[in-house]
Structure formats: C-alpha cells, structure tokens
Image (tube, grey):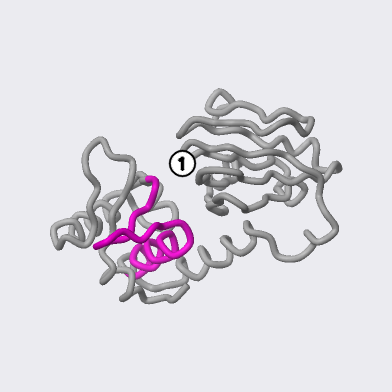
Amino acid sequence: MTTSAYRFLPDDPAAPLSMPRLQTVLLDPAGRDQATVLEVLEGVCRVYCPCEETEGMTLAFLQSGDRLRTDRMCSDGACVEALTALKFRRDSVSADEFGIDAVNEWTLQLLRVRHLGQAEQRLHALLALLVNRLGLRCSDAYQLPFRLTHDRFGELIGATRVTTTRLLSKWRQADMIAMSTGDVTMRIAPDLINSSPLQF
C-alpha cells in the first residue's frame, strides 16, 4: 500500500473533522506516547492495519459514539476509511477508558466469524454481525448504510473474491440480498439474519 492512498491525520487535537465517503486517513504511530482517542461523531468507518504483511486487514467498524485509542495500534499505525460521510474528533484519553474498547470487541467478533468452517457460514455470520451492529431496520428488511466490495467481504471471511461473488449472487437470486446499481446501501432479508450460524 502506498502512502498516496490516504492522507495523514493532524497531530494536534482539533475541532471536529469531516471526511467524504471512501476517503482514508492514517493515524500516525509516532504519536503513540501521547494517548489520544478518535471519537466518531457521525457516520460509519472501517479501521484497518496499513502493514504490507497483513494486506489491509480489517480490525473494526466504528459508528457514532465509538472511540478508538490511538496508543493501541501496531507500529505502522492504523487507517480509518470512511464508509459513509464521516465526522470525528480527537480527544484526550479519560480515566474510564482502560478496559475493552470498540476495536477489541470488533476484532473478537471477527475472529469468531473466521473460526467457522465453511465460507458460506462465515459470510452469513458476517452479514448478521454487520446488521446487528451497524444496520437499520426498515419495514421489510435490514439496511446497511454502506456497501463493501466482494474483495473486502473475501478479506473479512478468509475467502476469494470469486467465492464471495458466488455466495452473494446465490442470495441475491433468492431475494435475500438487494444491492441496486448506483446505490451505496445494502438491503438484507430478516430471514437471512435470523438464521445466522452465530448470534451477536
């Protein structure tokens, strides 16, 4: 991954910052000795490792109210990708933020998903996790306010893009998933979520 793929987050805590959908910032590991927190005010983002060895491994998805400790990152830092329009701010670490944080919890849940034996089970459970944590209930379906690429789904479940495409196509044909062309959201049938191999 080249540094031109993202911009650097300013070092000093500042007023709330806004990012358009699909923009990425790097949280510089150089400031790890000055523990700060990135708090999501609006929107949804993906936190991932920028290391070449892990190829952009997803650590967590954060939404409004979630906080990310910047001193709990690997030596290469962490990247924050806006999946929707995003607004966030940096703040100092408060005394009550020494337990499990949102990133640790997400990493644990993603490991549970990756532990399932079959790619279909893993994708099924991942969709349930995303809907339960980030989805909205509509009259006849759940809606995710963002869409992930088939490559990203593959990275999250440890499968190839081809396998992911095949599984998503199967569910689309069964009217369990809808992703309209040009729409940035994803609609998922309650039956698919309710039959997940893992409960979240």
- 159 in relation to 40, above or below: below
Indicate left or right for 31 with 21 as reference: right
Q: Residue furthest top?
A: 4
Q: Residue at x 54, y 33 (%)?
A: 24
What residue span does the magenta drawing correspond to?
Answer: 121-146
Q: Nearer the viewer, residue 30 or 84?
A: 84
Quadrant of the frame with the N terminus: top right
Residue at position x 66%, y 28% in the image = 8
Left or right? Give the position of 197 relative to 40.
Answer: left
On screen, residue 45 versus residue 91, left or right, reads left
Residue 174 vs residue 40: left or right?
Answer: left
What is the x, y in percent for residue 168? 25, 56
Q: Nearer the viewer, residue 47 or 12?
A: 12
- Quadrant of residue 16 in the image? top right
Quickly name the residue at label 1: 83
Magenta stretch contains residue 129 = yes
Is 181 magenta? The answer is: no
From the top left corner, tell me how far across and down residue 40 is, in percent. Answer: 61, 45
Q: Amino acid at mark 1?
A: Leu
Is the residue marked by circle 1 packed among few (<14), some (14-19), or many (20+) residues within 10 Å? Answer: many
